[in-house]
Image (tube, rainbow, N blue to C red):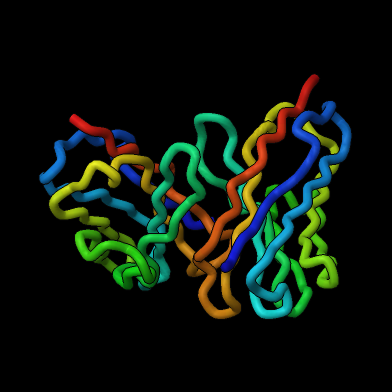
């Protein structure tokens, strides 16, 4: 199975700041990587797919980069509604696997 | 609009069989894959398996011996059955949608909590 590692389980930042969340795959997955956001009481939301393509409705302050094994989700100028949990997922091969998540909290 | 909603018993006894239903609207089960993903309390996400748009299934090998996914297209429902439940199967269970080519999940249900009692 492809192991997905999000090295930071917790990240604190202030509104207006920029943050980056990393995700590393145990083998090359090309750009078959998606990012999701989860907020309490809400369904998971797809933010980015193919490593860097914004899903319709995702604000432009979100961006994704990387290919192969190393990926990054960057949020520029944090808004209050951006705080929550972020997960990466590889869909290069089955079983589809997820990172362990990064919790982004308000500092 | 696209919606998925899970339903199920909430509480199941250990060693019994879990049955969950995912009812979808806004799209056809013959055009999209539907997966089941679960998340134990305080832990990460695990892809369990899926039923493809054509009706075939794929399972996570870790669960394959206990898991069955089927569908009723006339009711727009995807069914999950998992036997020999243990307390470790306590989790929120989500159904999700993906298309035939790209296996990321563009829509998720709100999830249903299942507690396995010993």
Q: A75 or A101: which is nearer to us?
A: A75
Q: B23 or A66: which is nearer to us?
A: B23
User: For this view, does B58 lie left or right of residue A104?
Assistant: right
**Spot occupied by residue A76 in the image (x, y as percentages of width and height):** 15, 54
Placement of the N terminus of chain B among the 4 image quadrants: bottom right
The residue drawn where x is 22% and y is 65% is A60
The residue drawn where x is 80% and y is 36% is B9
User: For this view, does A15 lie left or right of residue B84?
Assistant: left
Q: Residue furthest right?
A: B16
Q: Residue furthest front?
A: B1
Placement of the C terminus of chain B among the 4 image quadrants: top right
Rendered position, B65 above or below B89: below
Question: Is residue B66 at all visible to an observer of this figure?
Answer: no
Res B77 quadrant in image = bottom right
The residue drawn where x is 67% and y is 80% is B31
The residue drawn where x is 67% and y is 66% is B25
**Spot occupied by residue B111 in the image (x, y as percentages of width and height):** 62, 45
Res B114 quadrant in image = top right
**Spot occupied by residue B46 in the image (x, y as percentages of width and height):** 58, 47
Q: Residue furthest top?
A: B118
């Amino acid at each position: 199975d492809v192991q997905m590692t999000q090295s930071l389980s917790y990240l604190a930042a202030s509104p207006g700041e920029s943050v980056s969340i990393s995700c590393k795959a145990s083998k090359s997955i090309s750009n078959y990587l998606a990012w999701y956001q989860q907020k309490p009481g809400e369904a998971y939301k797809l933010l980015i797919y193919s490593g860097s393509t914004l899903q319709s409705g995702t604000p432009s302050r979100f961006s994704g980069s990387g290919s192969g094994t190393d990926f990054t989700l960057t949020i520029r100028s944090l808004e209050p509604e951006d705080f929550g949990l972020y997960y990466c997922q590889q869909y290069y091969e089955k079983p589809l696997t997820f990172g362990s998540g990064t919790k982004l909290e308000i500092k | 609009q696209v919606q998925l909603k899970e339903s199920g018993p909430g509480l199941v006894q250990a060693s019994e069989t879990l049955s969950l239903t995912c009812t979808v609207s806004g799209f056809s089960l013959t055009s999209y894959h539907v997966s089941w993903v679960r998340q134990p309390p305080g832990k990460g996400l695990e892809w369990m398996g899926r039923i493809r748009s054509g009706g075939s299934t794929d399972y996570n090998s870790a669960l394959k011996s206990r898991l069955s996914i089927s569908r009723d297209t006339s009711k727009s429902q995807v069914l999950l059955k998992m036997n020999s439940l243990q307390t470790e199967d306590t989790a929120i269970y989500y159904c999700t949608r993906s298309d035939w080519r790209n296996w990321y999940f563009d829509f998720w249900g709100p999830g249903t909590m299942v507690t396995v009692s010993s």
